[in-house]
Image: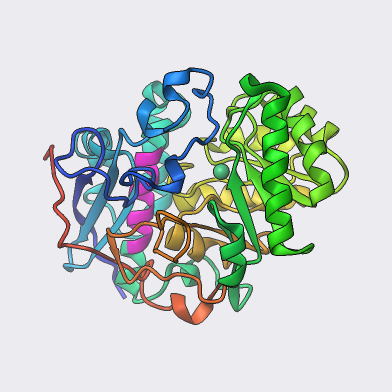
Amino acid sequence: MSLPTIKHVRAFFMGGATAKNKGQGGGDYHDQGGGHWIDDHIATPMSKYKEYEQSRQSFGINVLGTLVVEVEASDGTTGFAISTAGEIGCFIVENHLSRFIEGKRVDDIKLIHDQMINSTHYYSGGGGVVMNTISCVDLALWDLFGKVLGQPVYSLLGGAVRDEIKFYATGSRPDLAKEMGFIGGKMPTQWGPHDGDAGIRREVERIKDMREKVGPDFWLMWDCWMSQDVNYAVKLAHACAPYNLKWIEESFPAAQYDNYAELKRQVPAGVMVSTGEHHGNLAAFRTLSETGIDIMQPDVGWCGGITTLLEIAAIAKSRGQLVVPHGSSVYSHHAVITFTNTPFSEFLMTSPKADTIRPQFDPILLGEPVPENGRISKETLTKPGFGVELNRDIALERPYTH
Ligand SMILES: [Mg+2]
């Protein structure tokens, strides 16, 4: 079969600081309405400032909003993807990246990816919103390629190595996640080094209370969102180890590799160290892998897309490390079901009280699968591309054209 070429790329956004409609969720899953667990006194690098301690939205965590990239082939097939990059991402796609995309064949994904990465080094800083944008284009290209061939993305990647994906849940209610069939629950820490030992004691009370609710074997983890220093993280890990803490995640900002290596040396036996959702390029993951952490957690919508995620997974595999991507729903599912070193995956609870299952990127995707009894089967992922469609009932803005 002769493959079509890519005729148009278009970029839209919803939510975020410049949108008319805010707080809808979507690709920027921090962009939620009031009273949501994901914005309730979660420890961050900004928590040391009292005015930014209670809410992450107060310091602008939802300023970007959702980026939607749509690619249209010469045969009329369209593919699309979403990430977190909003209006800035639209500028980059329409004014810069479009030149590398239009006119290429739909299977020229690696060539386009390499040109996007190398043409943006001078302003990407090795990651951040530029890499979120590149990731979104890469995912849209994989979606288009799958839809042109009539095959799911996981087949294009070499096929599934397991029949189902098992999930742990990230949210405020691991006890409810257990009832829903998940294998574990990861809670955000709410206190940090500026709270001193009182912060440690409060977290111990939280995990003690949750351990009593979920029994001895259900996994419990801490997600620390870059809020700690080595001393605090080590103390927290030791204080929580008696409650069978499974891992401690993202204690430090991405570039503090020495701190990750030190934390790995000092955690109690059996407590794993993980991070990666804010590492934005392949070299960063190589350095991260060298720290000896147990689980690398790239976000496929932020690390360079599926094309880079495959390379990260290979680095992890070479060291016997796990790669368990940060959330990312279908974009992650189609990759990890092909990885031998991803024995479980993350489901991010986006219902406001973490008491019901809501699709992670609700409301922007149609047909977004959710775990049933904590699992998604291979059969659920057999539709072409990533198996989802763009919800056209949502008002999307296209601020730039080319
Ligand atoms: Mg995390």
| Residue 153: % across, % down | 44, 67
| Residue 113: % across, % down | 40, 44
Q: Which residues are magenta?
A: 132-143
Q: How is the image coloured?
A: rainbow
- Quadrant where the C terminus is found in the figure: top left
Q: Is residue 375 above or below residue 43?
A: below
Query: In terms of image quadrants, where is residue 251?
Result: top right
Magenta stretch holds residue 133: yes
Task: Give the residue at x 44% y 66%.
Answer: 357
Magenta stretch holds residue 96: no
Task: Give the residue at x 45% y 47%.
Answer: 37
Q: Is residue 47 above or below residue 218?
A: above
Task: Give the residue at x 45% y 45%.
Answer: 38
- Quadrant where the N terminus is found in the figure: bottom left
Task: Give the residue at x 48% y 49%.
Answer: 300
Q: Would you say 343 lies left or right of 373 here?
A: right
Q: Would you say 280 lies left or right of 118 here?
A: right
